[in-house]
Amino acid sequence: QVQLVESGGGLVQAGGSLTLSCAASGRTFSPYAMAWFRQAPGKEREFVGGITWSGGRTYYADSVKGRFTISRDNTKNTVYLQIDSLKPEDTAVYYCAYKSWSGSDYYTYAYDYWGQGTQVTVSS
């Protein structure tokens, strides 16, 4: 089992920045990749970006490229999501997710474990 705990969400003004963290624990923690998704009210959960755990290769949804940055700290089993130039449309619950295999990065079914989410609210 793997446990994922997100933190760092909150209320931020448009144009500001925020860094979310996802701390992982569990005896079997050995992901192929970790990813971030978000879900706005009334919308489906959408892929934001991911990072391969061993190589640190990052990849992002086109809609967030240039503003979102994912990084990891292997020693702490923690993945981060930095969001710059926040927009009101970034308001959502942000989830981190664990994937044990490659492929299907954009699809929720590909992920084995999920955190409980952290709320990000951007005011205009």
Image (spheres, rainbow, N blue to C red):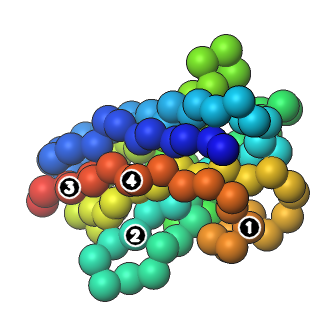
Ranked by sequence position, the earlier of labels 2 and 1 is 2
Instruction: Please name the residue that numbered disc 3 is placed on.
Output: 122
Q: How packed is label 3: few (under 14 Cα within 10 Å), some, or many (20 or more)?
A: many
Query: At label 2, which amino acid type do we have?
Result: Gln
In terms of secondary structure, where does tag 2 sit?
strand
Give the mark, 3 or 2, whose residue is nearer the N terminus.
2
Give the amino acid at mark 1.
Ala
The answer to whether residue 42 is left or right of residue 107 is left
Decide: is 47 above or below 34. Answer: below
Task: Say which residue label 1 marks.
Answer: 110
Considering only order in the chain, which callout, 1 or 4, is on the residue closer to the N terminus? 1
Residue designated by label 4: 117
Q: How many marks?
A: 4
Q: Amino acid at mark 3?
A: Val
Tell me the distance, in whole angstroms, between the alpha carbons under discs 3 and 1. 29 Å
Q: What mark, if any, has residue 75 been given in the picture?
A: none
Secondary element under disc 4, as helix, strand or loop, is loop
The CA distance from mark 4 to mark 1 is 18 Å
Numbered badge on residue 39: 2
Frontmost of labels 3 and 2 is 2
Q: Residue at x 66, y 44 (%)?
A: 1
Alpha-carbon span between mark 4 and mark 2: 9 Å
**Lower position in the chain sequence, tag 3 or tag 1:** 1
Look at 66% across and 50% down and name the residue there. Answer: 98
